[in-house]
Image: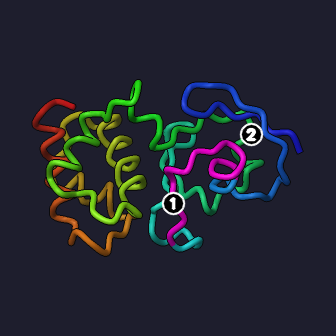
């Protein structure tokens, strides 16, 4: 099946089985390896991307469902090889350790900041609740997002 996606601001055509997962299309067909497969069951959030502005677990989305949609991946955050402010703050706060959850956390956080420019720490916790991390204990991730809010990022 021929699918047309708008990924990170550019039009892409992909030939793939309709039920191929969006995660696999992004990684295998488009070479965008930022989204990670953690569990493959929609439980961990490591594969979180934005689909028409909504956070989704790309391991659960059939590629055909994304046909004609706008998809943003973690690669979209960096511009011209430079980390976004949110990405830099994750690094500075120690919120990026092993790196498996980081892309999903960044996408969930960026979606929150787009919707709610001045979220409370409680808002941050709720927005990131669909993403699991086994390294940081979450506090450094929450701190990075709160610092981004304080910096106006």
Q: CA distance from mark 2 to mark 1?
A: 21 Å
Residue at 33% x, 64% y is 129
Residue 137 falls in image quadrant: bottom left
In the picture provided, is 80 more to the left or to the right than 72?
A: left
Q: On the rendered image, what quadrant is the C terminus found in?
A: top left
Magenta stretch holds residue 35: yes
Specify the farthest residue to the front: 81
Q: 101 or 119, which is in the foreground?
A: 101
Please tell me how crowded label 1 is: few (under 14), some (14-19), or many (20+) other residues with Cα within 10 Å: many
Please tell me how crowded label 2 is: few (under 14), some (14-19), or many (20+) other residues with Cα within 10 Å: some
Residue position for label 2: 67
Residue 99, placed above or below residue 146: below
Residue at 66% x, 35% y is 69
Residue 55, placed above or below residue 152: below
In the picture provided, is 28 more to the left or to the right than 84?
A: right
Residue at 28% x, 37% y is 116
Secondary structure of the residue carrying tag 1 is loop
Disc count in the image?
2
Residue at 61% x, 62% y is 59
Magenta stretch holds residue 2: no
Secondary structure of the residue carrying tag 2 is loop
Q: Which mark is residue 36?
A: 1
Where residue 113 appears, x then y in whole percent? Answer: 29, 38
Q: On the rendered image, what quadrant is the N terminus found in?
A: top right
Specify the farthest residue to the right: 1
Residue 26, placed above or below residue 137: above
**Highlighted range, magenta:** 25-38
Q: 142 or 10, which is in the foreground?
A: 10
Residue 97 falls in image quadrant: bottom left
Where residue 148 appears, x then y in whole percent? Answer: 18, 39
């Amino acid at each position: 099946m021929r699918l047309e996606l708008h990924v990170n601001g550019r039009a892409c055509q992909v030939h793939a089985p309709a039920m191929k997962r969006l995660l696999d299309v992004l990684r295998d067909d488009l070479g965008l390896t930022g989204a990670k497969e953690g569990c493959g069951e929609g439980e961990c959030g490591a594969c979180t991307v934005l689909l028409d502005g909504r956070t989704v677990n790309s391991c659960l989305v059939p590629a055909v469902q994304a046909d004609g949609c706008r998809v943003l991946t973690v690669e979209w955050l960096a511009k011209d090889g430079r980390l976004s402010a949110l990405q830099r703050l994750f690094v500075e706060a120690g919120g990026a350790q092993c790196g498996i959850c980081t892309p999903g956390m960044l996408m969930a956080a960026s979606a929150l900041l787009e919707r709610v420019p001045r979220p409370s720490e409680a808002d941050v916790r709720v927005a990131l609740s669909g993403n699991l991390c086994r390294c940081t204990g979450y506090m450094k991730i929450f701190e990075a997002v709160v610092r981004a809010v304080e910096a106006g990022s």
